[in-house]
Amino acid sequence: MPKSNLTKQNIQKQNRPTHTPLKLYRNQTINRTKDQFKLLQGIKKNLLAFFRHLQTQTPIMSQPNNNQNLSTFIKSGFYYFKGSNTVFIDPVRVLNQSYTQFTVTPSAYYSRFFEPNRRTDEHLIISEHKRKRKRKEKKVRELNEREQAADQRHQRVKPLLMKALECLLEADDLLLNLGKLRIDDCGTFEPKLTVESDEQSFVELGSVWQAPLFEISLHINQDHRLTQDCIFVQNCEKRNVPAFGCLVANDTNSDMEADFLNRRYVIPKQSSFYMSDLKQIHGLIPGKHECGFNLIVIDPPWENGSANQKLKYPTLPNRHFLSLPIQRLAHADGAVIALWVTNKEKLRIFVEKDLFPKWGVKYMATHYWLKVKADGSLISELDLFHHRPYECLILGYYYGKDEDSEHLSKLKSIPDCQVYISIPGDYSRKPPIGEILREYIPGLEPARCLELFARELLGGWTSWGNEPLRFQDSRYFTRKHQ
C-alpha cells in the first residue's frame, strides 16, 4: 500500500474555505449595503427630477395660498419669520418695485446656485461596514493671532446663523417655492443670457482720455403701444447728456430707456446715477447739507488676494476708502451708514479703528447676509474658514449738525444681529436692503438715499460708481405686456 503524502494538517488546509465565515459575512453585508445605497440614490434622483418638474410648471404668483407671510412675500419680496429677527429676500421682487414698464428677468438675475444639492448621502451607509483605508493625516496648521480672532468672532455668530437657517427650513410654504423664484412669466427656467463678451466695460471706458466726450441718449416721454405683437413707440424725444462725470436723472414716474454705444439700458423711475472713478466723486456732493443723503449704503471693492475676484472686477487698497467724503454727502440731520464687509479680521479692525472714526460715524449694529441655494441649503459649509456662506453689514450713524441728547433721543435704535437670507445673484451682487433700513433713517420723509460703488439703479435712489449701469442692460429685463 503506497504511503500517502496527505497528512492530517494538509487535509485540513485543503478543506479550509477561501474566506472565513466572518470575512464572508462582512463582504456579503458590504455588497448588500452598496446595493441598498444604489437603490436609495436612484429613488432620490427620481424624486429630485419629479420635484424639479413640479417647480417649473407654475410660477409662485399663480398658486393660491392662505399664508399671510407668503402673500406679503409675493407682493413685496420680503418674508418675515415670526418671532425671529430673520427675513428672506427675493431681490427680483424688491427690484421690480422700481419699474413700471419693465420687470427684472428672474432667470437673468439668478444665474447661480439653482442646481440641487447632489452630494451623496453617505450617512446612509453603516459606518462599521465601510472599507477603511489608511490615509495620511493632514497636518493641521495652527491659526495665527488674527485668524484666531476671526474664528472667535465666527463662533459667536454661528448659533444666530444656524437659528436663522432653521427658520427657513421650517417654513414649508416658502421652502416649497424657492425653486420657482427663477421662473419667468413665460415659464422658462434656463437663463436667457449668453456669454457677456459684448457687454460694455464701463471701467475701461471711464479711464480713457475720451471719457468726457461720451454721451448717453435718454428717451424722454417715450410711450409704447403693443398692437398685434408689435411694439410701436410714440411721443419719443431724445436728449443727449454726458455719460461720465455728470448726474443723469430720471425724475419721471415711469421707466426711461437710454442708448449708449449701441447698447440699450433701462433707467427706473425717480432714480439718478453719477458715473465716475473715486477721484471725481466730489462732483456728487450737494451744494447744501440740507440736500444731503439720509441713507448711504456702501459696497466697496475691497482688496482681496483671490485671483478669481480680480478677474470679476477691479479692487482698491483699503486706504483709498478713507477719502470718501461721507460727512459732506450726509444730510444735515444725520444719516444711516451701511457698509458691506467680508469676514477678514484685518478688514473688520480697519473699519472699527480707522474707517468709521475717519468718517465721523458711530457704530450701531451688525447685520448678516446668509447665502443659500434653491433647495434651502447653504452655498458652502458654515465653518469653511476662507469661504464662509455669509457676509456682514456694519451699520452706524453720522449724527450731522446736532449731537445733543435731544437730537439723539429722536433716533430710532437699530437692532443688532439681524439676518437676511437670499439666493445670491451675480458675483458680489448684494440683496437690496434699503427698504428694511428706511425706518431707522433720521430726518423727514421722503428720505434721500445713496449707494456708493453701485452696479445697479433703484427707484428713489442716487447711484454712484464706475459702473452703475452694469445690471441695467436691457438683456436683464422683460418688457411688461400693456
Image (cartoon, rainbow, N blue to C red):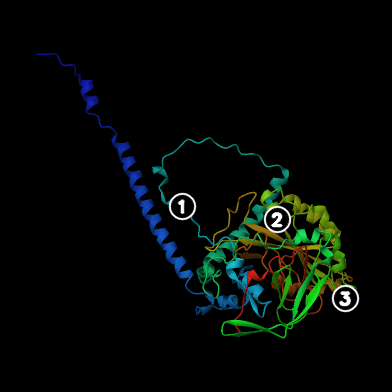
Q: Amino acid at mark 1?
A: Thr
Closer to us: 47 or 200: 200
Closer to us: 70 or 198: 198
Q: Tell me the residue at 65%/62% (across/down).
A: 369
Contact, mark 2 vs mark 3 (Cβ under 8 Å) = no
Q: Residue 342: which numbered mark, if any?
A: 2
User: Mark 3: which secondary structure?
Assistant: helix
Query: Counting residues from the N terminus, which is met first, the one under dot 2 or under dot 1?
Result: 1
Q: How many marks?
A: 3
Q: Amino acid at mark 2?
A: Thr
Q: Is residue 254 above or below residue 434?
A: below
Quarter of the image where the C terminus is located: bottom right
Closer to us: 142 or 73: 73
User: Mark 1: which secondary structure?
Assistant: loop
User: Mark 2: which secondary structure?
Assistant: loop
Q: Position of residue 150 (x, y in %)?
A: 69, 50
Quarter occupied by residue 92: bottom right
Q: Position of residue 33 (x, y in %)?
A: 36, 48
Left or right of 381 in this view: 223: right
**Distance in Å between CA atoms under marks 2 and 1:** 31 Å
Q: Residue 120: which numbered mark, if any?
A: 1
Q: Position of residue 244 (x, y in %)?
A: 81, 66
Q: Amino acid at mark 3?
A: Glu
Residue tagged by mark 3? 290
Q: Is residue 52 above or below residue 37?
A: below
Q: Residue 468: which numbered mark, if any?
A: none
Quarter occupied by residue 428: bottom right
